Structure formats: structure tokens, C-alpha cells
Image: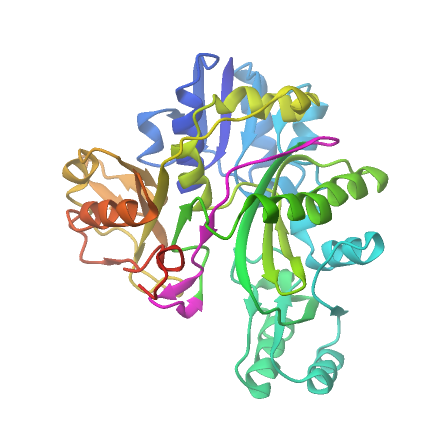
Amino acid sequence: MRILVVGGGGREHALCWSIAASPLCDKLFCAPGNAGIAEQAECVPIAADGIDHLVEFAREQRIDFVVVGPEGPLVLGLVDRLAEAGIPAFGPSAAAAQLEGSKGFMKDLCRRYEIPTAIYERFREAEAAKTYVASRGLPIVVKADGLAAGKGVVIPGTLAEAMDAIDAMMADRVFGSAGAEVVIEEYLEGEELSFFALTDGRTALPLASAQDHKRAGDGDTGPNTGGMGAYSPAPAATSVVESEIMGSIIRPTVAAMAREGAAFKGVLYAGVMLTASGPKLLEYNVRFGDPECQVLCVRLMSDLLPALVAAHDGMLEQFDLRWLPEAALTVVMAAQGYPGSYAKGSEIRGLEAAGKIPGITIFHAGTRRSEDGRLLADGGRVLNVTARASTVGAAQSLAYRAVDLIDWPEGFCRRDIGWRALGGRG
């Protein structure tokens, strides 16, 4: 098969790494890719949101199957456009991608079909949102309705911070059009879990559990980010918890989307809060998590590509993925200043030595090669140093051993990834 992966981050590097190992893959392209992906795939200079160019490229190159990594092109309808061109793809239609593209849409679906989630209201006027926040009091959560690269969620410490967050989203448009509407919801207490399931529109197949770290600083401090690290399995995801999530959240969502005329095919990534009254849905993403995809890929024993094709073809009922019993943990190395402003172009050294450590796989997220072959940082999140070992603790030690061999003064990382699984604060 001739395969095209769309995207250029750490998630897409992990997908390319897995797909390249499949005996079904004859030729692998990635658009736009990065310096690490170039080792597994032929990178083509087409942006992930360049829908017309991607469809044209897929036609010209006789692509048999497209795997869409990021949420942006899914919400823009890339899978629909490819289908019109007769090219099958892994990922939801634009109608189904609203589960991530609009938090309000997702919350309304939960309300209609009694899927457990936080109490909420939607607002298009800032003053009405502020009045509601004042009446509810703290703690409370303020969310931009649309796509905001994982940063459109604010948990204010004071009422003044809540009002400022509403103004920033709705008046200042710090997240662009994503903040034209906001969702205000109750704050849920408990442990957060990333839960993934492949679905073909009818059948849902749970994947291994994972947990990520959103805050920029150790001890879960600092601003929210796209993710600073992850590990798998997550001890909180017991077989009982998995059964509850599948029964009360995932399967009802798949059935609801089918009834709404927008059958969901692809991967459902549920952010779930394990509360005292049971699992509740925080949000849906309609693609693999980043960096959770990285730890899932290094634990997956089965061939990923046939499962992705089966999700498109409506044949997941026949699948049962196998996972290594070992744990995996990834540490994100980011450019200083992330998730705020940061500089590009600094040189990264030492990757070869770090990558030679047994059990280490380094996925690139934001890198490029200079004309003279040097590896340069080219994004906010730049590297995913991923370790596989017997336990989360052993994987953590191994990952940081590799991190310490990487010479990149302009980068930083958290030093406590996996602390929840280890029973401490890192």
C-alpha cells in the first residue's frame, strides 16, 4: 500500500514509525513531516491544512490510504474531500469532527443522550458569561468553544481571573474565532485519564490506557500546554474503570453520532475525570493524543495499519489489538518560553548518543535540518524522548537518562513525568 500521513509533530512521527514497520506498507509519505519523520517517510512540503494540495498530491501519487494526524484538517473536512476523490482515509468526517471542533456541540450531545459530563452552559455574549460565573462561584472552568491547540481551557483561581479569561477569549480573541463562544462548566474533582478507542461507526475497540501532563512546570504548575509528557499504562485505568467508560461514555457516543447522521470513524480520545460518582467526560478529541500516541505506539505489538484500515472499512469487530506488558513513558523537550513565545533555529546535539540507549525511541515534534545537516529546533514542542521498560518508574529513569545526554541549552522539560503513577509529586 502507498500511505500518506498528514501532519508534522511527534504524534505523526510515532504513527509513521509504526506504519513504516507494517508489511502492508510499500511506500510512505508524510506532509509536511519533520527531520525525524524523514528517516521513515518521504516528506512533502504541504501544510497539514492545505486541503486542496493534499487531495491533489494523493491523486497524483496514487495513494491507497491516508492517515490524518492533527485535528485541524479533520475539522476542515479533509476526509470528506478525500472520499469524494475516491481515496480512503483514517479519521472522522467534518460533521463527526465537531466533537472536538466545538465543545458546545459535544456538551449538547452529552445532554441529549445522557452521557455523564460536567454541568455547563454556552455563551456568545461576554456579559452573560460573566453573570453566570458570578452566580455559580468558584471553582469553575472557562473553555473556548473551538480549536485552540489544547490551550483554550482556563481554571481561574479568583473571580477576577475568570472574568479576565472570558474577556481574553471573547473580546481580545486570544484564540481567534475559537473564542467567539465559550462554555462555562463545573469543576470536577478526581483523577484525569486519557482514554482512547478506535471506532468504525458501529464498533468501538478500546486501546491501552495513558495519562498525560498538561501543565508546563513540575508538580503540575504553570500554564496549560499541548502536553509535556505521558505514560502508559495508567494505574487508574483498571478493568472496572475501562468497562465503565466504554459502557457509559464511548459506546453511547458512537451510537449517538450514528443517530445524528454523523457516524464517527477514527479514534475517539476522551478526556475523562474519575469522580466519586463515576467517570465523567471532560472533552473529546477526534485524533490520537500528542504525546499519548507516542507511548501507545511503542507498547503496541499488533500491526497498527490494518486496524486503521478496518476502522475506515467498518470491520473493527474482527480486531483484537495486543499490547506489550511493559510500561512506556515520554518526556517532551520544548523550546524555552513555550507555551508562550519562543525562538526557532537553535541547534540540538547529542541525539545519536541518547537514541542508542536500549529501550529509547526519540520522536521528533518540531525539528528541521539546516542546509549543512545540523538538527534545528523548529517549534514549541520539539522532541519526545520515549522509553519502554518493565515499570513506569524504570521507564522514567531511562527517559531522563537519555534526556541528560541531549545538548540543547535553549530547551527545557519537566523532570517529574509519571509522578502520579509513582505515588509522589516528582
Indicate whether 31 appears above or below 385: above
Which residue: 60% across, 38% down? 197
Which residue: 57% across, 75% down? 168
Could you tell me residue 5's position as x and y percent? 49, 29
| Of 322 and 381, the residue lying toward us | 322
Indicate whether 293 appears above or below 278: above
Could you tell me residue 94's position as x and y percent? 71, 40
Q: For residue 232, what is the image quadrant?
A: top left
Q: Is residue 366 left or right of residue 303?
A: left
Could you tell me residue 167's position as x and y percent? 61, 78
- Segment tinted magenta in the rendering: 200-223
- Which residue is outermost to the front? 240
Q: Is residue 297 left or right of residue 69?
A: left
Q: For residue 374, what is the image quadrant?
A: top left
Which residue: 43% across, 25% down? 301
Q: How is the image coloured?
A: rainbow
| Of 144 and 170, the residue lying toward us | 144
Q: Looking at the rendering, in which quadrant would you find the C terminus? A: bottom left
Q: Is residue 145 left or right of residue 212?
A: right
Which residue: 64% across, 61% down? 177
